[in-house]
Amino acid sequence: MWAAVIAEDDDAERLAADLAATLPDALVRRVGDVVHVAVPARVDLRQALGRIATGRPTGIGISVRPGALAVSLRQATSALAVSRLSNEVVVATDVASSRLILSHAPGAILQSYADAILGPLDASDQPEQLLATLSTFLESNGAYEVAAQALHVHRHTMRNRIARIEHIAGKRLDTAQDRFELWLALRVRDLTRVEGAPAAN
């Protein structure tokens, strides 16, 4: 089964009735100004809601076993919050993306974060080389051999560059938190380049 939560400020009771009539196998309830609906996994919930609940903020959870329906409902409720911002139907799997989070965070704050984390590397005597090395290393999941091959350098050169990056940035790439912070800063920079401007406010 999977669940959806649809916001309806005008007439949630009527929307609930329409959903119950249109989706005979559905479980439907109204909670204030939102409607909860759960249907069997075989039902194309996104398509059904596209016909019945067009233009309304809607969050959809993942498909789960019947005993875990509360999980799908919780995901749908969280996805509804994103749907209210984006004015689109949002499925929980769509939210499981760093790009979505970054695109909704204030651009100036993200840019400030990236500049603070990457600033020491930007100020080094070889910023482009070190940033490219860092990016490749992180995308290679910290595998020196793989990163060295991708950059066409010897593995010892790769190790030396990573040691230099750690020294300059004041980070340790063998710790999850430091790796994440550097990866996130690079991701912000990537989005800025792709979109031609800082992430949207």
Image (spheres, helix red, strand yellow):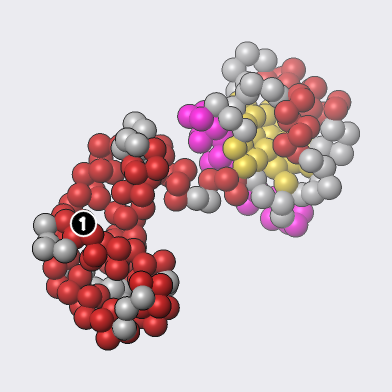
Residue at image x 31%, y 49%?
189
Q: Which residues are magenta?
A: 65-86
**Residue where numbered disc 1 is placed:** 118
Was residue 54 drawn as part of the magenta stretch in this picture? no
Q: Amino acid at mark 1?
A: Leu
Where, by quadrant of the figure, is residue 7 drawn? Answer: top right
**Quadrant including the C terminus:** top left
Left or right? Give the position of 104 relative to 97.
Answer: left
Coordinates of residue 149 in the picture (x, y in percent): 40, 78
Left or right? Give the position of 100 relative to 183.
Answer: right
Say if 3 sits above or below 182 in the image.
Answer: above
Dot 1: within a 10 Å radius of its alpha carbon, few (fewer than 14), some, or many (20 or more) residues? many
Residue placed most toward the observer, 153 or 187: 153
Left or right? Give the position of 85 relative to 70.
Answer: left
Q: Is residue 31 visible?
A: no
Where, by quadrant of the figure, is residue 14 drawn? Answer: top right
Residue at image x 36%, y 67%?
136
Coordinates of residue 52 in the picture (x, y in percent): 76, 24
Was residue 85 drawn as part of the magenta stretch in this picture? yes
Coordinates of residue 40 in the picture (x, y in percent): 82, 46
Say if 166 sits above or below 17 in the image.
Answer: below
Callout 1: SS? helix
Say if 182 sits above or below 146 in the image.
Answer: above
Coordinates of residue 37 in the picture (x, y in percent): 73, 36
